[in-house]
């Protein structure tokens, strides 16, 4: 600020138009930095007056005002940011600080507009007006880039002077890059419009005088409560609950969304704000703490409210600062940055972002519980309608003691009697399933407050184990009880080993749910199969259950299959050890407990065999049959695998996986029944040739013999008869140098089958992989064979970006592109430049692991490359193998979100396995280089 000249002797210095003392008193709320650091009132007002002094042009005055306030705004924002970085969890102070800074900017604009631009020394009664903050700003809570909602309030019709002041203020605030929402209304307008529109009414509920006439603000306050709020409590509550339901529906309807909107999602800030709005409207409280003496919340529940609010505001403020704009969507890339900003660190075998998101989901769950508690209080005093009884005319089972039906829900009739028998803390869930009633929030509150009664004695009580197993087995919908038990932390109290996976997020693009919700989804899928709802979609799993199986073992295995997650150790191995302790505690006999332990330890075995190995290779079937040993275990593992994959997310299961698991189950069941010696290449080749002969009955015998003699054994063993038939036609009379491509839907496999025939030459597999990468196809399986007379026959199964076969209309363009690349008209490597990973997906880290297996196949070395998926990765890997004189017979590609496992069945130049360790190490190093090249090209 420039120095001020001294006044001349004998002359009186004119009084300034306004001083810092004319700014309204601050709210006094604790801030993240000192008030002077956030907004130096004396210095800013002094600079403002100095810049304006002697200027009469309105535009110049406005520009000078914006310049001074913009500097103050930048300093204030920097001070708040520094304070937040030093103390990254003090969200309330941060939101109050941004509101304080905004208050001062609005108040300075008001002083300039009313004292300098449009002075009105003697305003009429109609020219007395007030500036109020409404909505979030009115509540005094602002994120770094929140909107500024202003209400310019006048006693009656707006005068020209008020219009001029409002216009000048808005121009100043807009030039400061504030996002201002505004309205100019009379008190009467506010009452009328608030009665018509619930959004306006909600904004008016949270209002605060920023500057101007206090008496006018008081008049609005009085009129709103007397003429509007007091008379419409029930309507307002129903409207807010309907808004909440619609908001949840738009956000996906689930609390455990992987990329939640911190403001709008279920369990987010808007849900907390809705609680506050309803409480304020009904109980006329100014702070949530006032709900404790009213008996709506206990001290512990209020602490949970405070904790959730503080956490969610922290997340939102960090999101805004990192994005540099208003951003409420907690995308994968933002999750990493917010976790770091809030001080989370990698530990206990999990990334910082996973610990952060686990806390996020725990708070979101608690918000749901608090909502239920408030709703029951409202129902109790008749300001919220009781839930509609859907089964009004349906005969319900009579409720047993010590329970009662209240407001259409199951409640506790006598608290002392209920708590006197700790078994009731489990029994109430059994009663809810038996009667079909939902739990009353009062009962849920009672359970949450008395979880300590679920102690070691209860956990080891055989009656408690019997009750719990009844929840799983007796009523046909165990997921309902398990989900409620989990939300109330009763499940983790009864099975403490379950507690670490509650709200545990897996930071990848594969799993759509937290580990606990995934476990409940898996059990839900088994219950659906048992109820006969998935017979058409899952014929094999339905048939196994219909035939009869040990359900106790199956349900306990599914409950425990991922219980070892989140620790540095292999979760299957750790989970098996946990199952060894938990299964007997749940009442399982030693033999059944042993089977549960085996299923947990091997719950990924069938999935790995089907998705990462060639199930047409007899060795794969023999090895898998040796591992499962019995038909009973095969059937159980099949059910565990199907339910596990279906429980990962809505679009993970498809016909491709279904046919693979059916084929593996069918082949393994036959091997167990007929003996493993019957599973060999010669048998399969003989059977395949017979099927081919039957399908080609119209071919002359000579041509038929020639075609069957043209191909080596793996060709007959590796692809279906339909492919043999098409290749016979494609290779027949194929001109030298020509390429034939056929694309057609393979409905059984939920994929497009791409078949290509041409003369063989080195690197053919890599060129085909490159061609398909360029057209954006996802390769799920690939096989290439060289005939004895020098033809390459390759078949690739492809899916589009959504995991489905290509639409018929897209096939001609796909075929043209493949043919161009195979003819060398397109340079694959150059064309792949610019194919990058999406920004939001770049933070997924997948360590690269490369392994060589000479035991998994009788005639091939199996190379497995487990790494981060990237555009063109398969092309880069196969290029390395081609340049290293490695012959690729076939590849199996398994994708798990951002992770991909590319498995290659290979031989060396002489048709032998890769036995030499130095050669393996050299090839592995080259493959790692290829992975790095693909990463650099994709922007990872």
Image (cartoon, rainbow, N blue to C red):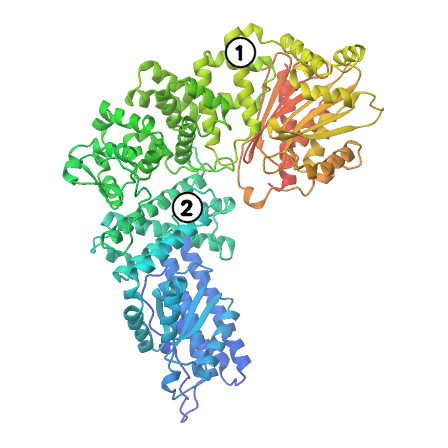
Residue 881: image tag: none
Q: Quadrant of the C terminus?
A: top right
Q: Residues within 10 Å of mark 1 (few under 14, many from 20)?
A: some
For the question of whether residue 270 can be seen, the reply is: no
Q: Which of the 4 image quarters holds residue 124?
A: bottom left
Front in this rendered view, residue 921 or 310 = 310
The answer to whether residue 161 is above or below residue 754 is: below
Secondary element type, mark 2: loop
Determine the residue positioned at 27% across, 65% down. 230
* 101 left or right, relative to 30: right
Front in this rendered view, residue 89 or 411 = 411
Q: Which of the 4 image quarters holds residue 747?
A: top right
Q: Residues within 10 Å of mark 2 (few under 14, many from 20)?
A: few
Residue 215 in picture, x, y percent from top left? 31, 77
Determine the residue positioned at 78% across, 10% down. 701
Q: Which residue is labeled 2 in the image? A: 343
Q: How many marks?
A: 2
The answer to whether residue 869 is above or below residue 330 is: above
Residue 522 in picture, x, y percent from top left? 42, 30
Which numbered mark, 2 or 1, is in the foreground of this view?
Answer: 1
* 888 left or right, relative to 462: right
Residue 684 in picture, x, y percent from top left? 63, 11
Q: Looking at the image, which residue sits at the far front? A: 393
Residue 918 in picture, x, y percent from top left? 63, 18
Q: Looking at the image, which residue sits at the far right? A: 736
* 449 left or right, relative to 745: left
Front in this rendered view, residue 594 or 694 = 694
Indicate which disc, 2 or 1, sits on the residue closer to the N terminus: 2
Q: Which residue is labeled 1 in the image? A: 670
């Amino acid at each position: 600020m420039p120095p001020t000249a001294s006044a001349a002797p004998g002359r009186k210095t004119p009084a300034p138009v306004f001083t810092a003392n004319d700014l309204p008193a601050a709210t006094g709320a604790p801030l993240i930095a000192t008030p002077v650091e956030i907004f130096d009132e004396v210095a800013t007002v002094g600079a403002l007056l100095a810049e304006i002094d002697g200027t009469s042009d309105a535009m110049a005055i406005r520009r000078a005002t914006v310049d001074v306030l913009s500097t103050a705004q930048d300093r204030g924002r920097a001070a708040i940011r520094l304070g937040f970085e030093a103390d990254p969890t003090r969200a309330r102070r941060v939101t109050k600080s941004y509101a304080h800074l905004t208050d001062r900017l609005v108040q300075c604009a008001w002083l300039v507009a009313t004292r300098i631009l449009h002075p009105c020394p003697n305003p009429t009664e109609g020219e007395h007006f007030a500036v109020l903050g409404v909505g979030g700003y009115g509540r005094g809570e602002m994120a770094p880039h929140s909107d500024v909602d202003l209400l310019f309030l006048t006693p009656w019709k707006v005068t020209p002077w008020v219009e001029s002041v409002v216009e000048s203020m808005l121009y100043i605030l807009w030039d400061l890059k504030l996002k201002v929402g505004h309205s100019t209304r009379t008190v009467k307008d506010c009452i009328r419009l608030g009665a018509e529109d619930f959004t306006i009414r909600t904004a008016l509920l949270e209002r605060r005088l920023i500057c101007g006439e206090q008496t006018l603000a008081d008049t609005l306050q009085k009129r709103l409560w007397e003429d509007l709020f007091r008379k419409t409590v029930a309507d307002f509550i129903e409207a807010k609950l309907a808004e909440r339901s619609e908001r949840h529906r738009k956000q996906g309807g689930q609390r455990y969304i992987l990329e939640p909107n911190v403001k709008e999602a279920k369990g987010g800030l808007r849900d907390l704000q809705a609680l506050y709005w309803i409480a304020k409207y009904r109980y006329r409280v100014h702070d949530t703490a006032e709900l404790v003496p009213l008996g709506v919340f206990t001290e512990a529940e209020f602490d949970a409210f405070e904790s959730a609010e503080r956490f969610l505001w922290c997340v939102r403020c960090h999101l805004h600062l990192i994005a540099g704009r208003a951003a409420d969507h907690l995308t994968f890339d933002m999750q990493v940055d917010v976790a770091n900003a809030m001080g989370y660190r990698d530990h206990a075998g999990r990334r910082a972002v996973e610990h952060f998101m686990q806390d996020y989901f725990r708070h979101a769950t608690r918000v749901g519980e608090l909502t239920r508690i408030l709703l029951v209080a409202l129902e109790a005093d008749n300001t919220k309608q009781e839930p509609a009884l859907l089964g009004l005319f349906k005969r319900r089972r009579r409720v047993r003691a010590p329970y009662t039906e209240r407001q259409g829900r199951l409640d506790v009739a006598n608290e002392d009697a209920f708590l006197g028998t700790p078994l009731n803390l489990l029994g109430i869930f059994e009663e809810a399933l038996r009667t079909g009633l939902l739990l009353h929030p009062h009962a849920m509150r009672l359970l949450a407050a008395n979880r300590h009664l679920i102690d070691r004695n209860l956990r080891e009580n055989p009656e408690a184990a019997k009750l719990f197993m009844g929840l799983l087995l007796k009523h046909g919908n165990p997921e309902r009880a398990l989900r409620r038990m989990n939300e109330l932390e009763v499940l983790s109290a009864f099975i403490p080993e379950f507690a670490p996976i509650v709200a545990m997020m897996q930071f990848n693009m594969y799993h759509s749910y937290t580990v606990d919700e995934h476990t409940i989804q898996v059990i839900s899928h088994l219950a659906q199969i048992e109820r006969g709802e998935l017979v058409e979609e899952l014929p094999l799993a339905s048939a196994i259950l219909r035939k009869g199986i040990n359900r106790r073992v199956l349900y306990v295995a599914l409950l425990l299959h991922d219980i070892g997650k989140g620790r540095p150790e292999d979760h299957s191995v750790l989970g098996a050890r946990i199952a060894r302790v938990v299964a007997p505690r749940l009442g399982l006999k030693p033999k059944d407990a042993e089977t549960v332990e085996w299923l947990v330890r091997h719950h990924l075995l069938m999935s790995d065999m089907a998705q990462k190995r060639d199930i047409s290779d007899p060795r794969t079937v023999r090895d898998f049959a040796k591992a499962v040993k019995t038909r009973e275990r095969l059937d159980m593992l099949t059910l565990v695998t199907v339910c596990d994959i279906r429980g990962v997310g809505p679009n993970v299961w498809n016909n491709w996986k279904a046919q693979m698991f059916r084929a593996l189950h069918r082949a393994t069941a036959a091997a167990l029944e007929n003996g493993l010696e019957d599973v060999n290449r010669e048998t399969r080749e003989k059977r395949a040739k017979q099927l081919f002969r039957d399908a080609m009955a119209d071919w002359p015998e000579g041509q038929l013999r020639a075609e069957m003699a043209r191909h080596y054994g793996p060709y007959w063993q590796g692809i279906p008869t339909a492919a043999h038939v098409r290749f016979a036609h494609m290779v027949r009379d194929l001109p030298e140098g020509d390429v034939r491509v056929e694309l057609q839907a393979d409905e059984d496999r939920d994929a497009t089958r791409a078949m290509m025939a041409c003369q063989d030459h080195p690197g053919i597999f890599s060129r085909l992989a490159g061609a398909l990468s360029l057209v954006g196809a996802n390769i799920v399986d690939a096989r290439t064979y060289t005939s004895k007379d020098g033809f390459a026959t390759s078949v690739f199964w492809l899916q589009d970006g959504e995991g489905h076969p290509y639409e018929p209309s897209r096939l001609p363009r796909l075929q043209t592109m493949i043919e161009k690349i195979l003819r060398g008209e397109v340079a694959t490597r150059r064309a792949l430049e610019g194919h990058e990973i999406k920004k939001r997906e770049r933070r997924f880290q997948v360590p690269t692991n490369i392994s060589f297996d000479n035991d998994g196949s009788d005639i091939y070395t199996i190379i497995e490359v487990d790494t981060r998926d990237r555009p063109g990765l398969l092309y880069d890997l196969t290029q390395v193998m081609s340049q290293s004189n490695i012959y690729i017979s076939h590849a199996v590609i398994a994708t798990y979100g951002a992770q991909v496992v590319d498995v290659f069945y290979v031989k060396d130049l002489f048709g032998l396995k890769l036995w030499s360790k130095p050669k393996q190490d050299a090839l592995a190093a080259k493959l790692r280089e290829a992975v790095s090249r693909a990463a650099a090209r994709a922007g990872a």
